[in-house]
């Protein structure tokens, strides 16, 4: 197995996802001409690729467009658990959305798991699919009681599982809960096979093709940044954060969370199963076999994007946890992922806004995109071919549950306003001369707030820190070397290019000729 050069037992210098290593990804051209298809899908992650797979099997003409490379977004940075056990959620759902809807959520994710299992078997896909029991454990009395309530919810909803006394780790727990017969797999190996099937069936895939708008109507038209037009009977927005919100106000109805992952070689043998802590900070565990060698994935440390401590500290915390529980021989990969969380913790899947049956959206999967993304694709397929689906009402984006949606709406948007004001009042003391190679920071330059990153060669990259979405001030993410917006989770490279929406335009670059306080040698030119 190939991996990055680094010292044993130390965090790798560069972030890179385990799921994108040693996998041969197909390459596709960018869109060069206008198109007319039955369905255009924006986004080539698990939702978009599974939707295309299902729809070409229905005989429809399908085009998938991706702003970057296929499977390089959240899908390529997942933990790849396929489960209906999504933290402590079912007791909460029973109280907030009702018993029947809570049961439907379990069924939708269970059916998604079964679909993946059957697809793997049907096509004989070598993607390390394996059935695993899924555990939530508590290390505090507070969360031990919450697990008791969740166990009662399992019994009420008829979920196979229940409380257990112990888990096979050196972790002192006070309670735990198991959901039987869940699963895990290698997501990119699975989806690369679906991509092959899509293209063999005549489906079209275009990379480096950014959708920027939709002309609505009976035959909606997706407009790309390169001024190409794709006319279709249906548009599926599967781009993580919706590139087009219409009147759906999705920016105000979700927030972005980041979490962190390490792929490690351990001294102690991994005992099997998939695990997540109920307590904060989150700790999630699973293993994967690579060339007969067991690799453990340690995931957690979630926080709102662009807010909180130095992001490298989150990787260090996972390293310390892994050392304590397993003993670490090597850390071979580190990466982070971004997830969107809705007001009521249910994904938004369905009509973009009520009465727009030809523009469909899937977003807000929290941290459970493998099952929810697959459930979304199955729902899309049924909606497009006119088949009844029992989960359509559950997931509809136009729903509104007064509790907790109203409270969370007010809290989230108060947070946005607070971050907007905080960023405008911030007056950093750092200057470009203070930066070492490989270091970035918000700086003051000629009396203005700017973002600066000095690369490993000593070249300085300076951008305006005002996010191009609604004008919040981005913050430096040292762990991933990106500029992250604390308001709605937009992320930009250190040169200012958009990496994740909702922002569509890059950060403005600063004109180096105006840097009177730097010599050409200082600026790297």
Image (cartoon, helix red, strand yellow):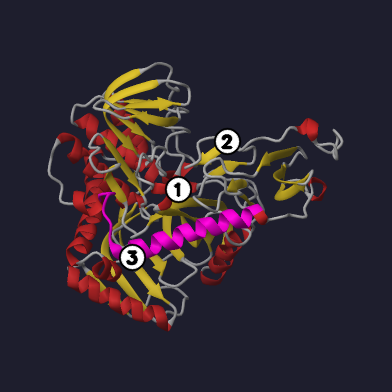
Left or right: where 105 falls relative to 417: left
Mark 3 or mark 2: which is in front? Answer: 3
Q: Is residue 367 above or below residue 52?
A: below
Mark 3: secondary structure:
helix
* Residue furthest top in the image: 33
Q: Which residues are magenta?
A: 396-424
Q: Quadrant of the C terminus?
A: top right
Q: Give the image location of residue 274, x and y in percent.
A: 37, 63
Q: Give the image location of residue 402, x and y in percent.
A: 29, 63
Q: Nearer the viewer, residue 20 or 31?
A: 31
Magenta span includes 476: no
Q: Is residue 519 above or below residue 145?
A: above
Mark 2: secondary structure:
loop
Q: Give the image location of residue 95, x and y in percent.
A: 26, 71
- The residue under label 2 is 506
Residue 74 visible to the viewer: yes
Mark 1 or mark 2: which is in front? Answer: 2
Q: Mark number for residue 518?
A: none
Q: Mark number for residue 404?
A: 3
- The residue under label 1 is 291
Left or right: where 509 falls relative to 237: right
At 22% from the left edge and 37% from the top edge, which residue is drawn?
A: 357
In terms of secondary structure, what is the magenta stretch mainly?
Answer: helix
Mark 1: secondary structure:
loop
Find the distance from the CA under tag 1 to the CA under tag 2: 41 Å
Residue 79 visible to the viewer: no
Find the distance from the CA under tag 3 to the CA under tag 2: 34 Å
Where on the picture, by quarter, is residue 446?
top right
Question: Which numbered disc flags the more N-terminal residue, 3 or 1?
Answer: 1
- Marks 1 & 2, CB-CB < 8 Å contact: no
């Amino acid at each position: 197995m190939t991996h990055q050069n680094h010292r044993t037992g130390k965090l790798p210098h560069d972030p890179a996802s385990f799921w994108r290593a040693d996998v041969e990804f197909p390459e596709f051209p960018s869109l060069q001409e206008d198109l007319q298809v039955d369905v255009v899908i924006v986004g080539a992650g698990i939702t978009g690729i599974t939707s295309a797979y299902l729809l070409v099997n229905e005989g429809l003409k399908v085009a998938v467009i991706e702003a970057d490379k296929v499977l390089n977004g959240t899908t390529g940075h997942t933990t790849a658990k396929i489960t209906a056990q999504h933290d402590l959620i079912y007791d909460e759902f029973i109280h907030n959305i009702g018993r029947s809807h809570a049961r439907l959520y379990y069924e939708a994710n269970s059916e998604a798991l079964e679909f993946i299992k059957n697809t793997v078997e049907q096509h004989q896909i070598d993607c390390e699919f394996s059935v695993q029991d899924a555990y939530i454990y508590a290390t505090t009395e507070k969360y031990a009681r919450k697990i008791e309530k969740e166990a009662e919810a399992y019994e009420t909803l008829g979920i196979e599982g229940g409380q257990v006394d112990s888990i096979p780790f050196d972790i002192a727990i006070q309670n735990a809960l198991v959901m039987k017969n869940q699963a895990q797999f290698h997501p990119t190996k699975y989806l690369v096979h679906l991509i092959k099937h899509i293209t063999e069936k005549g489906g079209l895939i275009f990379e480096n093709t950014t959708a920027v708008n939709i002309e609505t109507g009976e035959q909606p038209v997706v407009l790309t940044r390169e001024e190409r037009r794709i006319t279709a009977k249906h548009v599926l927005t599967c781009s993580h954060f919706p590139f087009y919100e219409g009147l759906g106000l999705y920016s105000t109805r979700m927030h972005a969370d980041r979490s962190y992952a390490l792929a490690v070689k351990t001294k102690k043998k991994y005992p099997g199963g998939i695990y997540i802590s109920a307590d904060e900070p989150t700790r999630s565990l699973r293993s994967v076999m690579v060339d007969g060698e067991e690799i453990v994935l340690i995931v957690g440390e979630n926080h709102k994007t662009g807010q909180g401590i130095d992001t490298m500290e989150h990787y260090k915390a996972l390293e310390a946890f892994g050392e304590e529980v397993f003993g670490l021989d090597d850390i071979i990969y580190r990466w982070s992922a971004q997830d969107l969380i809705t007001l009521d913790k249910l994904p938004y899947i369905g009509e973009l806004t009520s009465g727009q049956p030809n523009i469909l959206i899937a977003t807000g999967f929290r941290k459970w995109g493998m099952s929810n993304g697959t459930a979304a694709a199955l729902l899309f397929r049924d909606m497009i071919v006119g088949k009844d689906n029992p989960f359509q009402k559950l997931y509809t984006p136009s729903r509104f549950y007064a509790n907790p949606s109203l409270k969370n709406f007010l809290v989230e948007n108060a947070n946005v306003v607070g971050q907007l004001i905080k960023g405008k009042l911030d007056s950093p003391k750092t200057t470009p001369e203070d930066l070492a190679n490989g270091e970035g920071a918000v700086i003051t330059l000629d009396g203005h707030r700017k973002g600066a990153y000095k690369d490993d060669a000593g070249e300085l990259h300076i951008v305006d820190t005002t996010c191009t979405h609604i004008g919040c001030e981005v913050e430096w993410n040292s762990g991933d070397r990106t500029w992250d917006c604390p308001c709605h989770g937009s992320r930009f490279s250190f040169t200012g290019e958009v990496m994740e929406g909702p922002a569509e335009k890059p950060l403005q670059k600063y004109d180096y000729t105006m840097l009177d306080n730097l010599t050409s040698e200082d600026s790297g030119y």
